Amino acid sequence: MASRHTVLMRLVASAYSIAQKAGMIVRRVIAEGDLGIVEKTCATDLQTKADRLVQMSICSSLARKFPKLTIIGEELVVWVDPLDGTKEYTEGLLDNVTVLIGIAYEGKAIAGIINQPYYNYQAGPDAVLGRTIWGILGLGAFGFQLKEVPAGKHIITTTRSHNSKLVTDCVTAMNPDDVLRVGGAGNKIIQLIEGKASAYVFASPGCKKWDTCAPEVILHAVGGKLTDVHGNALQYNKEVKHMNSAGVLATLRNYDYYASRVPESVKKALVP
């Protein structure tokens, strides 16, 4: 057990440093002016030069420092999203962008790192850009100030670029006071923990395990909850399908209120 904890702490420390380097790469690509955009599956599913460089940097760094990572009991899995919010990155909505490194053990997300490369980017030319948020279950989450939405307010954060009738029906069922449409799963969880939104509602199979692993840990470490729309915990073992086919429902507080309002029609449409 002690050896397992030692490996985890070394891995988290390395991932924190790697995530900060990744944030620098993301900013450098923007500064150089050539995003190198290619479409993966459709016009809203994009990849940039930053995606490719960050993926290469993270994978090579982890492989160099942890050459046996994939065979540590064959139960420790690292889920990486080199650029969460790629579409927003290409459109200049830079505060939506994050780099995500999630660590799972026996299928459960246990540690996560979120680098926000352009945090503070609207604070002026002399502002220090970027921050790294990290957390470990049972230890806590760090790098931000925890805030909550005022009591009685229902502010929903949801997808900006993958809207559908299911998404709209589910959001409407929450009886929201306001709806925020932004990019990036990491960005949406940051909105929850910083008091900008009450619930992240995404009734769609468009989100993947590398989008949710790291953010889930940060949220759970401060008492929140992230599941699919049926209330099932997400699994992160290496054999699991990558798509979160039953959507995402996440809150910092009052999870049961939002879970109870998910329409049956949505649940029937989204099969785990």
Image: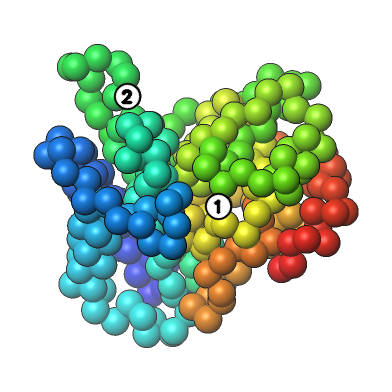
Please report the residue visible at 27 percent of the width from the left and 51 percent of the height from the top.
37
Q: Which mark is residue 120?
A: 2
Residue at the front extreme of this rendering? 43
| Up-down relation of residue 209 to residue 96 (above or below) | below
Q: Is residue 256 visible?
A: no
Query: How dense is the environment of label 1, judged by Cα within 10 Å: few (below 14), some, or many (20 and up)?
Result: many
Tag 1's secondary structure? Answer: helix
State whether residue 233 appears in this view: yes
- The image's colouring method is rainbow
Residue 148 in the image: above or below residue 97: above
For this rendering, which residue is in front, 266 or 236?
Answer: 266
x%, y% of residue 3? 38, 74
Question: What percent of the width, then of the height, locates residue 67?
Answer: 24, 79
- At 65% from the left and 28% from the top, the residue drawn is 179
Please determine whether, in this image, residue 131 is positioned above or below residue 49. above
Of mark 2 and mark 1, the one earlier in the sequence is 2
Left or right of residue 179: residue 120: left
Indicate which disc residue 186 carries. none
From the image, which quarter does the C terminus lie in? bottom right
Relative depth, front residue between 99 and 43: 43
- Residue at the spot 78% in from the left edge and 61% down from the top edge: 269
Using the numbered discs, state the Cα–Cα distance from disc 2 to disc 1 in whole angstroms.
23 Å
Tag 2, which secondary structure? loop
Q: Please state if 261 lies on the left or on the right of 66 as rendered.
A: right
Quadrant of res 154: top right
Q: Amino acid at mark 2?
A: Asn
Which image quarter: residue 90?
top left
Q: Label 1 amino acid? A: Glu
Q: Position of residue 136 (x, y in %)?
A: 47, 53
> What residue appears at the point 35 percent right and 35 percent down from the top-left corner?
91
Task: Give left or right: position of 10 versus 125.
Answer: right
Q: Which mark is residue 216?
A: 1
